[in-house]
Image (spheres, rainbow, N blue to C red):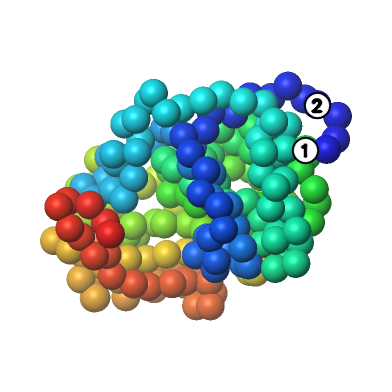
Amino acid sequence: MKNATGEKIRVLGINRHRMKTDGKGITTLVALPGCPLSCRYCINAWELEQKERMREVTVEELAEELAVDHCYFVYTNGGVTFGGGEPLLQSQALLAFSESCPKEWQINIETSLNVPPKQLKPLLNERFSFIIDVKTMDSDIYRSYTGKEQDLVLQNIASIAERIPDDQYVIKVPEIPEYTTGEDVEKSCRKLFEMGIQKKNIVTFSYVVNNNRIV
């Protein structure tokens, strides 16, 4: 590992040996606390409420802990995926982590992009790939589903389209029960096309909801 920065990162949990679910190859999912959204259906709602599970470590300590799977990462072109919650709320810690872990590790960020642009822009480089869940590109539906405005999301998508190569990001557009239809998904895709997003970078699918949670 490189010279210690002392940068701290708050962690909720770690899930190892995930295969092609959070990026290429074998990945370890690191769940981070905090989210700006209040989505009607949330896969991690319960986990995000478990404050007693949260621990704070330095990015160097986290890298050392994850290094147990270094060989898996290297041989499968895998690495570490930060999810949550919203990882970009700790963007400076993610940047410090990228400078502390081996360059062979792929670093993926699962994000809604609903953060100030200053929290995204330092990470728009070759070290980071993004898995983006935009929910919908309809501002009214977005507000109803998440409880937030969509302006920051649109700004950040534009930055990614301009500064990140196509193979470093994917945008997920789900069909959400009671909120969006297949037609709404198509409209969202068309809006993304107009923003310069290629079809190959968009993934459409349907949420499966059970007991008000995505499963």
Q: Are marks 2 and 1 in contact (CB under 8 Å)?
A: yes
Using residue 3 as the reference point, say whether residue 148 is left or right of it: left
Tell me residue 23's x, y (percent). Answer: 57, 63
Tell me residue 18's x, y (percent). Answer: 53, 60
Mark sitting on residue 36: none
Find disc 1 in the rendering and name its residue. 100
Taking the spot 76% from the left edge, 43% from the top edge, the residue there is: 101
Tell me residue 132's x, y (percent). Answer: 48, 57
Q: In which quadrant of the rendered view does residue 71 lie?
A: bottom right
Find disc 2 in the rendering and name its residue. 4
In the rendered image, the quadrant that contains the C terminus is bottom left
- Toward the viewer: 151 or 54? 54
| Inter-mark Cα distance, 2 to 1 | 7 Å
Q: How many marks?
A: 2
Using residue 145 as the reference point, say whether residue 49 is left or right of it: right
- Toward the viewer: 142 or 33? 33
Taking the spot 33% from the left edge, 57% from the top edge, the residue there is: 135
Q: Is residue 183 above or below residue 171?
A: below
The local crowd at label 2, few if under 14, some if 14 to 19, many if 20 or more residues have their Cα within 10 Å, is: few
In the rendered image, the quadrant that contains the N terminus is top right
Residue ranking furthest to the front: 68
Q: In which quadrant of the rendered view does residue 50 lie?
A: top left
Taking the spot 50% from the left edge, 78% from the top edge, the residue there is: 199
**Type of the residue with mark 1:** Ser
Helix, strand or loop at label 2? It is loop
The local crowd at label 1, few if under 14, some if 14 to 19, many if 20 or more residues have their Cα within 10 Å, is: many
Taking the spot 37% from the left edge, 66% from the top edge, the residue there is: 173
Tell me residue 157's x, y (percent). Answer: 51, 55
**Type of the residue with mark 2:** Ala
Q: Is residue 206 above or below residue 37?
A: below
